[in-house]
Image: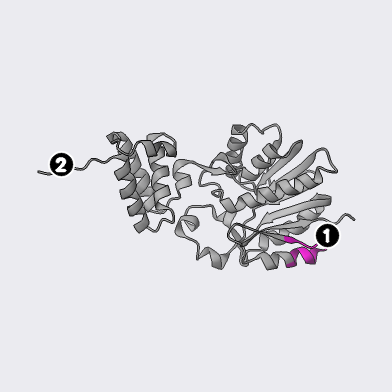
Amino acid sequence: MSEIEAWTVGRLLQWTADFLKEKDSTSPRLDAEVLLATARNCERIELYTAFDEEPPEAIRTKFRELVRRRAEGEPVAYLVGHREFFSLDFVVTPDVLIPRPETELLVVALLDAAKELRVRKSSLSIADVGTGSGVVAVCAAKNVPKCNVTAIDVSSKALHVARNNIDTHGVGDRVELIESDLFAQLDDRRFDLIATNPPYVSEPEMQELRPEVASYEPHLALCGGATGTEIIQRLVPAAAERLVPDGYLLFEVSPMIEPQTHQIIRAHGDFEEPQTLKDLAGLARVVVAKRRAG
């Protein structure tokens, strides 16, 4: 009579990775590891020294539930409640977009622009429009010396998540949260830098998104209208009024709308020729526009 094979950590990971691969996960092994580490309440790296351990039934039950939800399409970040971004850990909920590596390029562009501006100014005023979970605002506050950040979002639920992250990372004295549609609810303050990851997915493209994105992440933060540029068309003139001379507007875009974004900026006339930064995949990802000096 053969012995029943034990459900060790190693076996659980292998079975789950194979199962999630069949369910069309793009990173089945990573998903399995993150979910099991969550169920065990340990760091993912600790799994590698525990392959032969057999988790107790309570942990296996919790793990099975997480795997079930993942197989149905629920994103891992929502299941575990956090996501790493720019080497920091952020709380995320279904009220905000899941931070993605591509958006780190927006932070890099912001830090580069801030470095240039600090040659002329001792302190900087920064706006993060559509702050969501607050990742860009927090990264700016932690990495730009002597700056004040205004984090803006139309969603009160998103601002609640952002507040959590701002407090966790100890930058509450430098970041102010404001509920507003773009700059509508702000006073007359002006900014040296305006950064944004606006909704830029067009309505036709929304139909082509992976189900885990289209079904679980907030539509308000994804869809930019019929062409994907509707928010950007409003943002560019509004930002021009709020930027100081030589200030920077930086925003994430999709490669599909990058040419139209340049046209919108050129048509407005208050900005120098826009530049595009490409991500690690070589795709157009961040547009940088400098406001004219005069």
Give coordinates of residue 123: x percent, y percent.
80, 38
* Three-letter code, disc 2: Glu
Q: Is residue 68 visible?
A: yes
Q: Is residue 190 visible?
A: no
* Three-letter code, disc 1: Asp
Cα–Cα gap, marks 2 and 1: 75 Å
In the displayed orientation, state which residue is furthest to the front: 49
Q: Earlier in the sequence, mark 2 or mark 1?
A: 2
Quarter of the image where one finds residue 5: top left
How many numbered marks does the figure carry?
2
Quarter of the image where one finds residue 272: bottom right
In which quadrant is the N terminus drawn?
top left
Give coordinates of residue 118: x percent, y percent.
81, 42
- Residue drawn at point x = 40 percent, y = 39 percent: 37
Would residue 155 be found to the left or right of residue 49 on screen?
right
Give coordinates of residue 256: x percent, y percent.
62, 67
Magenta stretch? 263-275
- Residue drawn at point x = 34 percent, y = 58 percent: 22
Q: Which mark is residue 270?
A: 1
Is residue 264 part of the magenta span, yes or no?
yes
Element on which disc 1 rests: loop
- Residue drawn at point x = 33 percent, y = 53 percent: 18
Foreground residue, 53 or 258? 53
The answer to whether marks 2 and 1 mark residues whose Cβ atoms lie closer than 8 Å is no
Q: Which residue is mark 2?
A: 3
Is residue 209 part of the magenta span, yes or no?
no
